[in-house]
Image: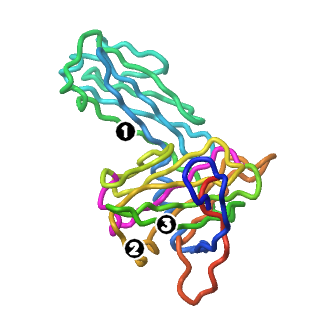
Amino acid sequence: VCVQAGSCTESRCEPTQALVVNQSAAEELVNQFATKLVHVDVVMGATGYTFTATNLAPTPLDVNVTATFGKVVAASAAQLHVSGADYTVVQDDPVLQFPLHLTNEQTWTVDAGKELDPSYADAVSVTATYTPPRLNWNETPVTMGVHAENLSNGTRIHLTLTPNKKLTGVSIPVEIPKCMAQYASQLKLHGHYTILKDDPLIVWQFNTLSQPAEITFDTKKISDDCLRQLKALTYARRIKGPVNPWLLVLRELWETAGRRPAAPALRGTP
């Protein structure tokens, strides 16, 4: 742990709660996560919309993104101009479908050819359909720990990740218990993340992970019992050379009292 913020010139090792595999919770979260592997963001511009589809799975997916446009945007599909993706016209109403072979992320635009009113931001609805891959979870070479820091107006949760080898394409879905927040908007989130469900279910992403890292978010004041309900799932696309890509592990974020003594783990970011 770094004693002072900024450059880590003074540090020390402290024990923190180690995380243990919970198989029933793992299967529940894996099944939940499998239906949320494709996330589509839509951002309105001056004359059209930018779509960004992100694949959170550890393998490429064939995805059909269907976009339905309100009549205020265009009276027919012929009035829309698409750049950056193939598409088919499902209905002239207009409804367009974009077939994607999605490895990581793809962005495309749909231009309406006219100035759009700010109220048209919600005039587009999207759905993404795909065949969920079979997600088998297994032990990943990451030591995980948790620490709750008291703030003047709430609690900051630190989820620490300490890899024992270089990982690439790392995703960490975290299921936030209701005792922390009813909705994702009630949390202050840090780092690179995607909100999968407002329930909330949030995934943090790292391009590479070779040194200790940390996920943090701020919530209201919580109890130790509430912290025990936090769950996380960790997987990596690749570990050094060729490996089985289905590397999933879910951990309880607290030791059950009396199960075994807490193991030392690094917390904090040097």
| First reached walking from the N terminus: tag 1 or tag 2 | 1
SS at circle 3? strand
Residue 78 coordinates in the image, percent (x, y): 31, 12
- Type of the residue with mark 2: Cys
Instruction: Give the vertical position of 235 relative to 102 (above or below).
Output: below
Along the viewing direction, whichever of 154 and 178 lies nearer the viewer: 154
Q: Nearer the viewer, residue 16 or 110?
A: 16
Q: Quadrant of residue 150?
A: bottom left
Q: Position of residue 194 (x, y in %)?
A: 45, 45
Q: Which residue is mark 2?
A: 226
Up the image or down, 137 lies above or below 60; here it is below
* Residue 21 visible to an observer of this rendering: no
Q: Residues within 10 Å of mark 3 (few under 14, many from 20)?
A: many
Residue 127's mark?
1
Which residue is more in the foreground, 113 or 64?
A: 113
Q: Between tags 1 and 2, which lies in front?
A: 2
Magenta-drawn segment: 167-184
Seen from the viewer's position, the closer of residues 114 and 62 is 114
Residue that carries the numbered disc 3 in the rendered image: 231
